[in-house]
Image (tube, coloured by chain):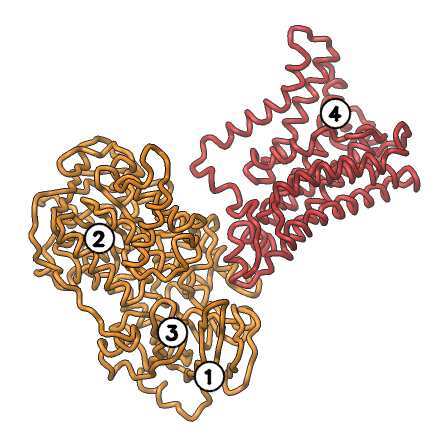
Chain colours: A orange, B red
């Protein structure tokens, strides 16, 4: 299955880029990039945020036009003036930022992604077939705003698969999947590749690239710095090529001094937001000073509800359900909780964690004013705000023009770095964060993780809600799994096997058993 | 109450509701595409004066209706060029369009004040349209039936056709629609033209059917009612029909009450009644629903420029 595609070296490459360059005002996004993808090959495109991967694939997909260079498709020079032209050639793309319509159903979203009109019943049948043959759980009649990020991504994948592409571009596809889901996605991708479709796979998760890809092209600063066989090259070497420096190991994770409980949830129950929210059922946990508590789980099992319950966006039924440093805060609002030292970072960056049209400095005021004297007596201290924002930008290496840049102008990874920096910079007593490094490149993710570990080491309690198990195993001292709104008892990470957690996340142990475990806690 | 009074109430009600229904239906399509055109009143007025002027000079009501539609589209295109091609602010441009429409219609209509034409009559033969029992169903003019057909048509278009789906998608997330490859600006031009056509037709209903004459500000603010109806009807054509007819019903009641000389209610209160009743009923209808905020197209009023 894996050997045959790579043997077809005599055929012209499915896609060959020669000397592609693209400049934006003030920045050379791509400079003299050449690469070729053979039929049936899974080709990795590696690089940090700002390395030019997104620009390159946008050129291939016809969203943007190259300033110089040529694109050859099956040996013929082609111009790709629009995504429609790209799709006509047989290029499909799953974007990192989804092109979805929140108030519409899954099936409507899929229909919108197709170029030709398809009869509704026929489309339903075709979608059902794709969902079944690739084992993708997705309800075609649900409205998109009720779906988790992981489920939304499946819509994009189904959209592409329906078009029977010859080249599939995947932009950071596994960021939100569980290990089992990743494995299943990989099987799907291998299956697609064995059918002759090439795959251009953008990721910064090196072990995934090692497991999946046949070839890797590494970009840095808009240029190709290396091409290698990821199955042979070491992960560390590829990471260093990518960031152009030595990769730092996270220091001081696991085994810090653990103190008393700082954030406690006791039998926290809360109905989910109708119509599709998950009910939180008797969630109990204790996050102690100096430790990182990881919460794993498949998207849509109550993570969003748990975060809004802890942040104070939705209030608990009784104050005692949530205690911060021993004080009941279950009925205190988000502002009061922030002032008391509970900082929360939701999963959605633009629109929830940050206001897209506000500048970074203004976004800093929004949450940091409670802990830092940025707005005493209601007057904003502009100088202090700018200095704080500038400090965050410097400390977390946020690539931006400065504190006055609007949040929407930053890439997802860069904005996440800024948001994490904003919260960590306030030295909160408790930090609850959902998906801290989703879409963030390896170097920056390491910096964010290190900052979380350091924050815990300074005596704060950190709760990390993530679907990235590697991240949780790297960071967390103890780990719980959330499944259908129930939280399992915490287990020390040292005793856990990755397969064991994966099975718990997938709910194979069943809700009943998870509840039983929780009850014994 | 005798049957004839009931029938005449129904006739008045339908006639009063139709122009609002038409203008609101056009605006609904415009807003579904993500554009907020506050110039409905202005487009109704240019439609009204164009329809009247052409009917009077040619003697053809049909040509008058066509002229009204074209005038509405022409006025709407001023708005479309400013807001879509030049990305001007939609709210300010829409307000300016209304003021422009009031002025332009007044200027064009100056020579037509005080003259009258034969009003638009029923389309069915007298045997049906004058029949005492069936008159309430068959006694209306062509625009009434057209407006009802359009409600069904727009509802079907938005719900069940691919172009309708794409139009909604553009209003829901213009950036995504653009990313997928839909021509956002062209689709919005089309929607605005449709809105202008229906507003022009609605306006002409005043000058060709209701009061077959021209007077300044003939539409008397009905364009604003149409705008409000779209919101209160939660962007759903069926509810829009209900809202427009409800408004017409209470307005008819007001006229009847005045005619009957009811004195315990101040006439000003009666005059307020259609507005209050319509808002109250439509608000109550949207109360019990789960996610009110998702009714409005997410990109409503936001300028879009392809980057």
Marks 1 and 3, how far apart at CA: 21 Å
| Residue A464, numbered label | 2
Q: Could you confirm whether marks 3 and 4 are on the same chain?
A: no
Q: Which residue is pictured at 36% across the width and 76% down the height?
A: A219
Marks 3 and 4, how far apart at CA: 72 Å
Local crowd at mark 1 within 10 Å, few (<14), some, or many (≥20)? some
Q: Where is residue A61 in the image (x, y as percent from the top left)?
A: 49, 71
User: Toward the viewer: A266 or A222?
Assistant: A222
Disc 1 element: strand
Q: Which residue is pictured at 73% across the width and 8% down the height?
A: B261
Residue A516 visible from this viewpoint: no
Image label count: 4
User: Toward the viewer: B269 or A64?
Assistant: A64
Q: Is residue B255 above or below residue B41?
A: above
**Chain ID, mark 2:** A
| Residue B12, numbered label | 4
Mark 2 or mark 1, earlier in chain? 1
Assign the N terminus of chain B to one quadrant of the image.
Answer: top right
Marks 2 and 3, how far apart at CA: 31 Å
Q: Where is residue A253 in the image (x, y as percent from the top left)?
A: 13, 60
Marks 2 and 1, how far apart at CA: 42 Å
Q: Mark 3 points at which residue?
A: A221
Q: In this view, does A487 lie to the left or right of B196?
A: left
């Amino acid at each position: 299955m894996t050997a045959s595609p790579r043997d077809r070296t005599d055929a012209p490459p499915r896609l060959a880029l020669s000397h592609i360059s693209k400049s934006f005002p003030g920045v050379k996004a791509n400079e003299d990039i050449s690469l070729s993808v053979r039929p049936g090959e899974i080709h990795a495109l590696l690089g940090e945020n700002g390395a030019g991967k997104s620009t390159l694939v946008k050129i291939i997909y016809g969203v943007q036009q190259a300033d110089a260079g040529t694109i050859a498709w099956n040996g013929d020079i082609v111009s790709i003036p629009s995504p429609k032209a790209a799709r006509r050639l047989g290029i499909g793309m799953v974007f990192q930022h989804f092109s979805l319509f929140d108030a519409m159903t899954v099936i409507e979203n899929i229909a919108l992604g197709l170029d030709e009109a398809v009869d509704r019943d026929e489309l339903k049948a075709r979608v059902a077939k794709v969902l079944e043959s690739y084992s993708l759980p997705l309800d075609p009649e649900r409205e998109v705003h009720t779906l988790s990020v992981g489920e939304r991504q499946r819509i994009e994948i189904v959209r592409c698969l329906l078009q029977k592409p010859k080249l599939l571009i995947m932009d950071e596809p596994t960021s939100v999947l569980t290990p089992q889901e990743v494995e299943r996605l990989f099987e799907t991708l291998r299956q697609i590749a064995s059918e002759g479709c090439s795959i251009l796979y953008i990721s910064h998760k090196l072990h995934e690239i090692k497991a999946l890809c046949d070839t890797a092209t590494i970009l840095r600063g808009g240029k190709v710095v290396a091409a290698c066989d990821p199955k042979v090259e070491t992960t560390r070497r590829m990471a260093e090529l990518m960031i152009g420096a030595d990769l730092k190991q996270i220091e001081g994770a696991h085994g810090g001094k653990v103190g008393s409980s700082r954030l406690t949830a006791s039998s926290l129950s809360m109905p989910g937001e109708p119509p599709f929210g998950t009910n939180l059922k008797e969630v109990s946990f204790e996050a102690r000073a100096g430790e990182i508590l990881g919460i794993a789980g498949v998207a849509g099992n109550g993570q969003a509800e748990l975060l809004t319950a802890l942040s104070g966006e939705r209030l608990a039924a009784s104050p005692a359900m949530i205690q911060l440093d021993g004080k009941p805060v279950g009925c205190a609002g988000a502002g009061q909780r922030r002032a008391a030292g509970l900082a929360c970072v939701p999963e959605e960056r633009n629109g929830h964690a940050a206001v897209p049209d506000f500048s970074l400095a203004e976004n800093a005021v929004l949450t940091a004013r409670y802990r830092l004297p940025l707005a005493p007596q209601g007057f904003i201290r502009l100088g202090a705000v700018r200095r704080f924002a500038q400090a965050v930008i410097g400390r977390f290496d946020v690539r931006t023009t400065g504190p006055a840049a609007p949040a929407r102008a930053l890439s997802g990874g860069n904005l996440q770095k800024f948001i994490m920096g904003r919260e960590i910079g306030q030295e909160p007593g408790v930090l609850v964060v959902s998906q801290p490094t989703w879409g963030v490149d390896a170097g920056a993710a390491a910096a964010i993780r290190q900052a979380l570990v350091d924050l815990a080491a300074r005596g704060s309690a950190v709760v990390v809600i993530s679907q990235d198990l590697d991240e949780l195993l790297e960071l967390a001292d103890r780990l719980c799994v959330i499944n259908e709104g129930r939280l399992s008892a915490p287990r020390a990470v040292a005793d856990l096997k990755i397969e064991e957690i994966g099975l718990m996340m997938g709910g194979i142990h069943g809700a009943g058993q998870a509840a039983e475990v929780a009850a014994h806690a | 109450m005798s049957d004839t009074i009931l029938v005449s109430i129904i006739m008045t009600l339908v006639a009063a509701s139709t122009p609002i229904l038409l203008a609101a239906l056009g605006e609904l399509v415009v807003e579904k595409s993500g554009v907020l055109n506050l110039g409905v009143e202005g487009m109704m007025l240019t439609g009204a004066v164009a329809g009247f002027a052409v009917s009077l000079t040619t003697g053809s009501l049909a040509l008058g209706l066509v002229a009204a539609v074209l005038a509405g589209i022409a006025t709407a295109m001023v708005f479309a060029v400013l807001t879509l091609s030049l990305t001007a602010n939609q709210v300010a441009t829409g307000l300016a369009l209304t003021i422009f429409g009031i002025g332009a219609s007044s200027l064009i209509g100056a020579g037509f004040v005080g003259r009258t034409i034969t009003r638009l009559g029923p389309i069915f033969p007298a045997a049906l349209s004058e029949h005492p029992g069936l008159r309430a169903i068959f006694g209306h003019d062509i625009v009434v039936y057209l407006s009802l057909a359009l409600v069904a048509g727009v509802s079907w278009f938005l719900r069940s056709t691919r172009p309708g789906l794409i139009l909604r998608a553009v209003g829901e997330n213009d950036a995504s629609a653009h990313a997928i490859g839909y021509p956002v600006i062209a689709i919005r031009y089309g929607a605005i033209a449709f809105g202008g056509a229906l507003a022009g037709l609605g306006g002409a209903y005043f000058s060709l059917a209701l009061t077959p004459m021209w007077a300044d500000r003939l539409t008397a603010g009905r364009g604003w009612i149409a705008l409000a109806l779209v919101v209160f009807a939660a962007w759903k054509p069926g509810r829009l029909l209900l809202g427009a007819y409800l408004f017409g019903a209470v307005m008819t009641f007001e006229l009847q009450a005045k005619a009957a000389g009811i004195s315990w209610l101040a006439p000003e209160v009666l005059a307020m009644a259609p507005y209050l009743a319509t808002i109250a009923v439509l608000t109550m209808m949207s109360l019990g629903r789960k996610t009110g905020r998702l009714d409005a197209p997410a990109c409503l009023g936001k300028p879009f420029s392809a980057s």
